[in-house]
Image: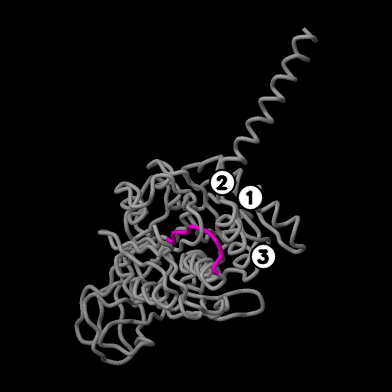
């Protein structure tokens, strides 16, 4: 097959520019259309192949040079938020999609986005919330719905989005403050990797997969994996943000090679390979740091890909104010660290460049332990 990248010459896009373009795009589960439109334009500007599957997940493919095993870098495009279900003058009925503890939301400001509204949205305030039943015994109750009042009457319609009125994308020192770091910062990681490969015409075969409806049960990922939308021999890496609360990780401590999530451990071979690559980068680049952690605050799409038969690993960024849950029950912008994000992009670039080393890394480790086992066996027998 001919290379997908068609020689469109561009300079590498600055990381902060990508963050400013992507993080503010309004999105919730099942209403990721704005992000998808951006992705299609991104691909067209760089001469990259773009497609959407029957479930609405998007794929951007870069291929240059000799045939090699495809690497799939995946991120989801939704974030918890409200969708308007009823309008009565200035009064709105809202459905919440995603997970946020029921202690949040009351009296918080939101911005409503829709086709008939200004791009910046219109302001409203939450007047009351309704909690869902716990998903399991002892689990916290979550916001299910809410009522809100517009500051001023406007052309709000059923299906419009109502999202927390916090920072859309601001930089304070090394921290990024944004409403939707989870997981649009992951999407930016994939886009930055594609952008750098395309700008420099590097050899590689990379598929950027951008899934839908993660926040309501990993739906886009599960549908894509079950339908075999990716090549069977793909190496899949799910890129996420994950809460560092409770000492799970250090924000600013580098990207995280994610061993598993709340319910599942991912491919040990992928984790071994990714860790080896991170170690290699650290030996070559002073200042590069990484972490290797479980990150069990929640689930991630790597579980769906792994259990449905793809060789799957995961990496993530340490996330502050997960799902906009700030201190003392107040809604706040999420945060990620710029150095962690840049480090994750560097790890992704190295995975593309050294995808052929995956099998060698595993084979070398097996050979080493086989040798250790044989030698240890001799000593153990002699010492009986």
Mark 3: few, some, or many residues within 10 Å (few <14, many ≥20)? some
What is the quadrant of residue 52 in the picture?
Answer: bottom left
Q: Position of residue 161 (x, y in %)?
A: 31, 76
- The residue tagged 1 is 292
Asked if residue 158 lies left or right of residue 197, the reply is: left
Label for residue 259? 2
- Residue 168, visible in the rendered structure: yes
Asked whether disc 3 touches disc 2, contact meaning CB atoms under 8 Å apart, the reply is no
Q: Is residue 295 depicted above or below 198 in this figure?
A: above
Secondary structure at badge 1 equals strand
Asked whether disc 2 touches disc 1, contact meaning CB atoms under 8 Å apart, the reply is yes
Asked if residue 371 lies left or right of residue 202, the reply is: right
The disc, 1 or 3, on the residue closer to the chain's N-terminal end is 3
Does the magenta stretch mainly form a helix, a strand or a loop? Answer: strand
Please state the extent of the stretch shown in magenta in the rendering: 201-208
Taking the view exactly as shown, the residue that stands out farthest to the top is 384
The residue lying at 29 percent from left, 48 percent from top is: 227
Q: Position of residue 287 (x, y in %)?
A: 75, 64
The residue lying at 70 percent from left, 52 percent from top is: 280
Asked if residue 288 lies left or right of residue 345, the reply is: right
Task: Give the distance between the C-alpha atoms of the residues marked 1 and 3, in whole angstroms.
Answer: 14 Å
The residue lying at 54 percent from left, 59 percent from top is: 243
């Amino acid at each position: 097959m001919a290379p997908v990248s068609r020689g469109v010459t561009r300079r590498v896009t600055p990381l902060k520019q990508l963050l400013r373009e992507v993080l503010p795009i309004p999105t919730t589960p099942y209403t990721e259309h704005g992000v998808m439109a951006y992705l299609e334009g991104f691909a067209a500007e760089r001469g990259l192949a773009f497609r959407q599957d029957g479930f609405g997940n998007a794929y951007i493919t870069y291929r240059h040079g000799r045939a090699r095993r495809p690497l799939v870098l995946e991120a989801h495009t939704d974030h918890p938020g409200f969708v308007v279900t009823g309008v009565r003058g200035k009064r709105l009925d809202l459905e919440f999609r995603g997970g946020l503890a029921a202690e949040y939301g009351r009296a918080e400001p939101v911005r409503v986005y829709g086709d008939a509204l200004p791009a910046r949205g219109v302001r409203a305030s939450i007047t009351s919330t309704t909690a869902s039943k716990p998903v399991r015994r002892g689990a916290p109750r979550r916001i299910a719905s809410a009522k809100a009042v517009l500051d001023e009457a406007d052309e709000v319609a059923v299906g419009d989005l109502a999202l927390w009125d916090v920072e859309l994308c601001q930089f304070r020192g090394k921290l990024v403050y944004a409403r939707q770091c989870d997981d649009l910062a992951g999407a930016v990681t994939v886009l930055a990797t594609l952008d750098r490969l395309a700008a420099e015409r590097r050899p590689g075969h990379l598929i950027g997969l951008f899934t839908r409806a993660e926040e309501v049960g990993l739906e886009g990922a599960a549908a894509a994996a079950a339908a075999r939308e990716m090549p069977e021999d793909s190496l899949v890496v799910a890129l996420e943000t994950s809460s560092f609360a409770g000492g799970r990780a250090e924000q600013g401590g580098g990207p995280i090679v994610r061993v598993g999530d709340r319910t599942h451990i991912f491919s040990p071979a992928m984790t071994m390979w990714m860790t080896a690559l991170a170690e290699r980068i650290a030996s070559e680049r002073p200042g590069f740091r990484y972490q290797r952690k479980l990150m069990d605050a929640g689930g991630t799409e790597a579980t769906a890909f792994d259990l449905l038969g793809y060789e799957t690993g995961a990496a993530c960024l340490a996330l502050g104010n997960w799902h906009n849950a700030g201190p003392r029950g107040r809604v706040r912008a999420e945060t990620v660290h710029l150095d962690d994000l840049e480090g994750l992009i560097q790890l992704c670039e190295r995975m593309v460049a050294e995808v052929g080393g995956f099998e060698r890394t595993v084979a070398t480790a097996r050979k080493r332990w086989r040798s250790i086992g044989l030698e240890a066996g001799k000593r153990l027998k002699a010492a009986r």
